[in-house]
Image (spheres, helix red, strand yellow):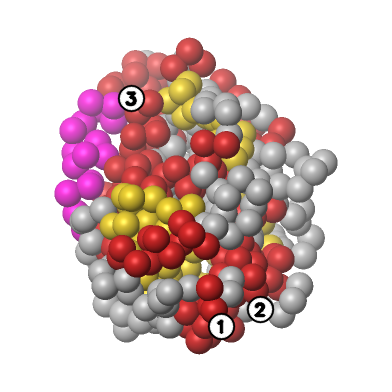
Amino acid sequence: MMEKYYIQIYRILLFNPMLKLRNIIKYSPYSLEKSQKNKLFKNFFTELTFYHYKKCKDYKKIIKNLKFKIKNRKNELKDFPMLPVTIFKTSKLISVNKKKIVKKLVSSGTTGQNLSEIYLDKKNANDQMMILSKIIEKILGKKRLPMLIIDQNPKLNNNRSIYNARTAAILGFSLFGRDYCYLLNEKNEIDYQALNNFIKKYENEKFFIFGFTSLIYECLIKKLSTRLLISNFKNGILLHGGGWKKLEKIKINNKLFKKKISKKLKLNNIYNYYGLVEQAGSIFIESKKCGYFHTSIYSDILIRDHNFKVLEKNKRGLIQLFSLLPSSYPGHNILTEDIGELKGEDDCKCGLKGKYFLVYGRSKKSELRGCSDVR
């Protein structure tokens, strides 16, 4: 009897069109209030958890060992078992046929570190880009903009099926740009000729600038010579993330970073983002008006203490991230090693709905994870 009930619930969840991602994407990413979002999010998240339970043997073992009653309809979001982010460094968790995997993402790190490995099928990769585009529209608009990339051309990576976090980010965000200019040449030096050609062509219109924070600081703030430039970056829109651990060592925080780049390049449209390769596509953009990161209708967040108790707002703890995107691997509910603080929900002065929060960096007791660090 229970097995029949189990199958019935599975069929209801699997074939209910109201729970499909395409039916959620019709809403603006920051448009739903708490009561509206919670119902929609929980239904989809319950389906996703059940799906991974059925499709991933290792995930099923974890759920059973934790004695979690997955069939209990009274489960709240906070009740669902979370996976520590480090599990993706030691286990290959996959919820689809291995033959359908088209891409492997690996986290960036230093030599000798274990790296997270995330496996994507075509559907999951497409879902990531579909949702990312909805989020990025809020700062770039719907038109593809001329794009300056503060890095080398990722074509230098010969294996097109394996991407580290940095390369994956460049390739992902490049879908929102056109007429690309890579700041660094094959020798990892600033290509002033290419840069000036780009600026000359687009200095009087909006253009998109993307890169990892530490590399932007190194290249644009420290190394770039304004005497060799024909103009400034005043019409640029900068989106950056990652690499904050390196800047922390030299006492550069988010506020000082913005101040330095604004003073040097007249660049004021600057947006920091927070995200993990383990939940690629489900990023959190820092609002320019308020300075907080915001959840979208595709993501959620809880803050927990070191005993895993959920904390109220204005208290620092470990960040737990939820995402509706991971379908080829069970990365939808992750406990990170980052310290954060929930500041509120639905009442931010910038006008965006959803939870808003701060990130303070890696927990001191945790393993460092390369350029995934965010401030």
Q: Could you tell me how far apart the alpha carbons at marks 1 and 2 are, in whole angstroms?
A: 10 Å
Q: Is residue 1 left or right of residue 65?
A: left
Residue furthest to the top: 99
Q: Estimate the x, y position of residue 45 in percent, counting from the top left.
A: 38, 42
Q: Estimate the x, y position of residue 337 in percent, counting from the top left.
A: 66, 56
* Residue pictured at 43% horizontal, 74% vertical: 230
Q: Estimate the x, y position of residue 54 in percent, counting from the top left.
A: 46, 22
Q: Secondary structure at mark 3?
A: helix
Which amino acid type is marked by label 1? Lys
**Highlighted magenta segment, given as a residue range:** 12-30
Mark 1 touches mark 3? (CB < 8 Å): no
Residue linked to disc 1: 260
Q: Which mark is residue 252?
A: 2
Which amino acid type is marked by label 3? Tyr
Q: Few, some or many C-alpha atoms within 10 Å of disc 1 (few <14, some 14-19, many ≥20)?
A: some
Residue 36 seen anywhere in this rendered image of the structure? no
Q: Nearer the viewer, mark 1 or mark 2?
A: 1
Q: Is residue 181 left or right of residue 18?
A: right
| Residue 116 versus residue 140 in the image, above or below | above
* Residue pictured at 35% horizontal, 67% vertical: 200
- Sequence order check, earlier mark of 2 and 3: 3
Of 291 and 69, the residue lying toward us: 291
- Quarter of the image where one finds residue 296: bottom left
Q: Could you tell me how far apart the alpha carbons at marks 1 and 3 are, in whole angstroms?
A: 54 Å
Residue linked to disc 3: 10
Mark 1 touches mark 2? (CB < 8 Å): yes
* Residue pictured at 37% horizontal, 22% vertical: 6
Q: Secondary structure at mark 2?
A: loop
